[in-house]
Amino acid sequence: MIQVHNIAKRLDEIEALSDVSFTVKKGSIFGLLGSNGAGKTTLLRIVAGILREDQGRVTINKEPIFENTKMKDRMIFIPDTLYFFSQYTIQQMANFYKSIYSEWNEERFQQLREVFDIGLDKKIQKFSKGMQRQVAFWLSMSTMPDLLVLDEPIDGLDPVMRKKVKNLILQDVAEREMTVLISSHNLREIEDICDHVGVLHKGKLLLEKELDDLKSDTQKIQIAFKGKTPEELFDGIQLLYKEERGSVMLCIVRGQADEVTTHFEKYKPVVFDLLPLSLEEIFIYEMGDVGYAIKNVLV
Amino acid sequence: MQSKTSWFSKEMMIQSFYSVGWIALIYLAGLLLTLPMRILMIWSSDNPSDYYAYHENLFDYNGEIQLILVFIVPVLLSIFLFRFLQVKNASDFMHSLPIKRTRLYNVYVGMGVIYLVLPVLITGSILMIMNGTMDLENYYSMKDIWSWIGLILLVSLLIFVSGVFVGAMTGMSALQGVLTYILLLLPVGFTTLIFMNTTYFLYGFSPDYYLSSQMIRYSPITSFFTYVVARGDEVFSWLDIILYLIMIIVFYTAGIVVYKKRHLEGVSQAFVFQSLKPFFKYSVTFCVMLLGGMYFRETQHSFVWLIVGYVLGSIIGYLIAEMLLQKTWRVFTHLKGYLLFAVLVAIAIVAFRFDLTGYENRIPELDEVEQVFIGQGVWHYKHKDEMSSINGPEYYQPTLTKKENINSVIQLHEFLVENKQSYSRSYHYTRVFFIAYEMKNGEKVIREYQVPETEELLTYMRPIYEANEFKEKTNRIFHIASEEVTRIAVDSREGQVIIHEPEKIATALEALKTDVKEAPFEEERSKGPFVPSINIYLSSGGDHNEVHLQFESSYEQFEKWLEEENLLDEVSLDPDEIEYAVIAPSKDIDFKRDDAEATKQVIKSPNALKITSKEKIQVSLENSNWADPGNEYVIVFKFKNSEPAQLVSFQNKDVPEFVKEHYEKGEVK
């Protein structure tokens, strides 16, 4: 669905993005993680066809997105700071969307009214930030988009509403194979809905992985030997992290659980445990030194 | 998809009406109040002066208010319609919609055009209905309405599209407004600045030759202002109208091109295109520098102040530009660019100052010159071929073609160039020379000098101004035949002489022609208050059927002629008529009050010299000139049969010997 190929963008003499590439498949939810100033918003604005990349290519369904009305008609971008015409009510704004987006679904719009439970004749700008975000979701989902691009969407929503919004997104992904690109500065907020994650740091994409792969591919083990630790212990296995506490070693290694177990059992340890590993830990160890720099994004 | 397009336009129209409808309503209200309402007020007024007031066209009704509306409303519309370009949220929103930029642009420009056109058409229709149903022929005609509609639409649409064009380049609404006016005034303002400043460096450069009155046509703001306020009818010819239409299309198209290339990340910055920033910065620096230089040069008249103006102007301009670009006032450390600019300007100033272009020293060779015009300013040169000169038709053309006279002009020119240091432009007692050489190869060499009048200068002027060719071309008397003359009248304090016999007219005219030819040139003539005037009345010439001369003391032939006809006594002033005269040094007299007060002071002055001797009075009469505090001595004549006494003065070169003797002795005492 979305193909981002080697894009670079300078904003006001500062390199906002450099050499960023990733792919988002149809019907998947891609989470873009990064601390403030990492370049998430710039990347999303490029994907939404607002900004033009300096180098590289962004295509959606193999077509460049910039000034592409056909693709933009099938896509909604919800920015972190929302915009509505001044003095407009929800109904007026809906009329505007209806006139702009060819797939506007009035039935859906009426259905969602029950979910959000906000009066149609209220002026949107008088609402709180959270309410405005709900209106943005409401209007966006009513256009039946193929692609939803969300910049920090969960901010400002209360837990109940978060749940509702996430369910709405998941429902459309499941039913219509809607594709979602979502950014956040916090992994926990989106880990329950994303199937893919990319980490953006200082304009560069450090990592792009499928979450399930990541989880099953990294193991935390506790291991101890009677006497000397065999020197060739880590031969043939990728060690991400090692820590010694007396005679007990704590290691993070890459590999499926059964592979890792068989590997270490060979050396007959006195203690060998596979320990639970949180997603944050995986990221931190996976990315080595940089992992610590972006730790705040992960917890 | 296709059916969506019409809906789309409807919702966009609604949206644009919500955001800028108020401007259109204010515009409509303003136009209705200034025109139909005002006309009804005059129509129903009891005041006859209101009723009979003459109205040239519809801009005569509250023209100033119409002017303000036409200058402000289109710019406001361009700012508010394209506000979505200058606000980040709105810009992101509008550009994430499935609408191409060209479409957005056309829809909003179209809306702007509707909001500008509708109020004018509504007002026009009301005026037409009023014209058709009420008795308003004295106020305006249908043709007036159409030309009013046409002109107001032309100007307002041009201002609007230029505002839109600027809006596509800048990222700040306030700057969009300011830059729109700057852009519109730029053609006039920049050329004025350049030519005025060139004058300060190129000795002999004539700014007025290039800065013609036509300049006002280069900007819709100045030309519309002139049309409405000064009622200049030179503006808005068909050519102007076509040019305005072309400019409307140019700005509209340029707006689209720029908008398509617009980088949306530049929103809220002064310019969305990086490359425009240095251009803007140095243009502002340069223009404010020229403005500062011009201000100080025109008020202080010195080169040092000019440089002070440049330094202050360029610093202020640079800082303002930098503040706008950086969006902070703390820019005082970003001066690297300024230093580079200052060095380049300094080099340019030195180059001009030392005339590296060779402009100042260029004096044409005698053989190259076809003819030369010499006058007191560019106005005379530009109007030399026109029939409406104040001195009568076609007789004010000091274009010299005789070789010796061209040579005299070249001599004067050489003298002016060689004495550049002493004759730099100064303020008091100066004379302007406008010299235009028309060369044999078709080129023109134009120079203008404003120099102090000195004795030495006069020796160079005399051969030109006393030449027969010059006199014949500048005095109408040489172009009239005695058959045309109906009468010649000589008027003075004493009385009047009228000559109407054809034979006498012929001889009198010949005598006058000789006298005018022989007369020293104007600077050396005395045309005092007691000099009789001579009027020659013509049977032809229309509005210019009078030729006016003054019976100057040098006119010996005409004096002789009058004497032979026994007419001289009737017009010449007899010293016996004068009871006494009082002379006093000007420095004792306070001229700030009126002449009557000054006269009293002269008579009461402790240094006053009272004369009653007939000879002295005669000498004083011959040498007296109009009262001028700049002259060293003033004199009051008391006539026997009239009050009050007449206050006059001696030009410094004409002070009679007895006066000099008296005061020089007095000072010895």
Image (tube, grey):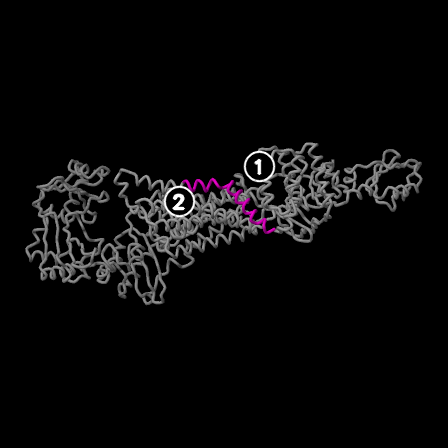
User: Considering depth in this image, is A197 or B296 the residue closer to the camera?
Assistant: A197
Residue B413 numbered tag: none
Is residue B189 within the magenta segment?
no
Evaluate whether residue A107 shows in this view.
yes
Question: Is the residue marked by circle 2 packed among few (<14), some (14-19), or many (20+) residues within 10 Å?
Answer: many
User: Considering depth in this image, is A103 or B314 the residue closer to the camera?
Assistant: A103
Q: Position of residue B394 (x, y in %)?
A: 25, 60
Q: In the image, what residue occupies the spot 77% across and 40% down?
A: A283
User: Considering depth in this image, is B154 or B627 the residue closer to the camera?
Assistant: B154
Q: In the image, what residue occupies the spot 82% across and 40% down?
A: A241
- The type of residue carrying mark 2 is Thr
What's drawn in magenta, residue-wise?
B1-29
Q: Position of residue B146 (x, y in %)?
A: 37, 51
Q: Secondary structure at mark 2?
A: helix
Q: Quadrant location of the C terminus of chain B?
A: top left
Residue A89 numbered tag: 1
Is residue B19 within the magenta segment?
yes
Q: Is residue B642 above or below residue A61?
A: above
- The type of residue carrying mark 1 is Thr
